[in-house]
Amino acid sequence: MTDLVSTEADCRPTSTNAMGTEQAGALAAVLKALADPFRLRMLSAIASDPRGESCVCDLAELAEVSQPTVSHHLKVLKDAGVLTAQRRGTWVWYQVSPSHREGVTFLLSTFAAQALRSSAPAGPANRDLDAQISRLAEDLASSHPSLPRETVVGLVRESYASLVSSARITTHLIPLTERFAKQRLADITKDRQSPQPQVLFVCVANAGRSQLAAALTRHLSGGLVIARSAGSSPAADLHPHVRELIDEIDGVKAQETFPKPLTDDAIRASDVVITMGCGDVCPVIPGVRYEDWAVGDPALASREGVIAIRDDIQARVEYLLNTLKPTS
């Protein structure tokens, strides 16, 4: 009997580290506000916007819902303390609250990727996918000995999570992740004294004009200028008319051109950053030249209209190349 009583007494915790009732209630309110797919997408768009804020007009493009519906969801996040808002003119601009910025960053960059992996059925296909990502991460870590292994592995998994969040078709996600991760690693390790100019074209969806501009720059410079593109909120795929024109310009296969997320490292690695007249504002990095081109949106144009947009971009690219001094 003594042993039994002693054993039971040993099983009783002498103290607890559980959060208090008030703290749990406050946290539950925030989690409840976040527990909506559309709100999470809006939060992701705001947090990843290089301007540090997003306008209601930007967020309304994420789904086919009315503006009052968008405003309602934003109010829920604002009331929960996740967002702050500022009215300027006729529009309201939203930012992640400074008090929640660290938590939102962890939620979107780390927890979301882990949750997506763990929530998928544990079948052979998903286990194989995770194994492929792990192998890719280890291979790239081995080929970049100057960088800490954990940095490379984290970058690969973050790259995959960024691409899968907007992908409709996942057939080519591993090779796309490899290409995106390799480019990011090249950005991190880039020699700023390299004589070969690098130009980055930026728009919101990276599905039209920025892709056309990059393809035209590569073609017209004969490869002497490194031309890339990215988007602050990349779409799932390129506009069909744009894809046709890029195939004609670059001669690339369809799966080799895809919308890519904008990163600070891509901006730092560039000599010239050009926004495409769609309201994007990039972080200002010393030594980087910035331009903004007011170019029409292919998403709103017919095929003939897209061709006219291509011709406009081509004239701008020709002028740009005359201001650069590429070396062979």
Image (cartoon, rainbow, N blue to C red):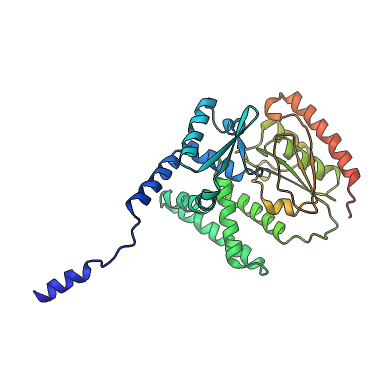
User: From what the image shows, is residue 20 above or below residue 320?
Assistant: below
Q: Which quadrant holds the C terminus?
A: bottom right
Q: Is residue 240 above or below residue 142?
A: above
User: Which residue is rendered at x = 58% and y = 34% of the image?
Assistant: 59
**Residue at x 53%, y 41% (from the top left corner):** 83
Give how far across and how far down residue 178 sits, in percent.
63, 54
Q: Nearer the viewer, residue 192 or 103?
A: 103
Foreground pick, 128 / 134: 134
Q: Residue 278 is drawn in which quadrant?
A: top right
Can residue 108 be spotted in the picture?
no
13 or 325, nearer to the observer: 13
- Please count the marks in the image: 0
Task: Reply above or below: 9 against 306.
Answer: below
Quarter of the rendering containing residue 205 = top right
Relative image position of residue 120 (x, y in whole percent): 43, 48
Query: In which quadrant will I find the N terminus?
Result: bottom left
Is 327 on the left-hand or right-hand side of 61?
right
Determine which quarter of the picture holds residue 61.
Answer: top right
- Residue 318, visible in the rendered structure: yes
Judged from this view, the residue extending furthest toward the left is: 1
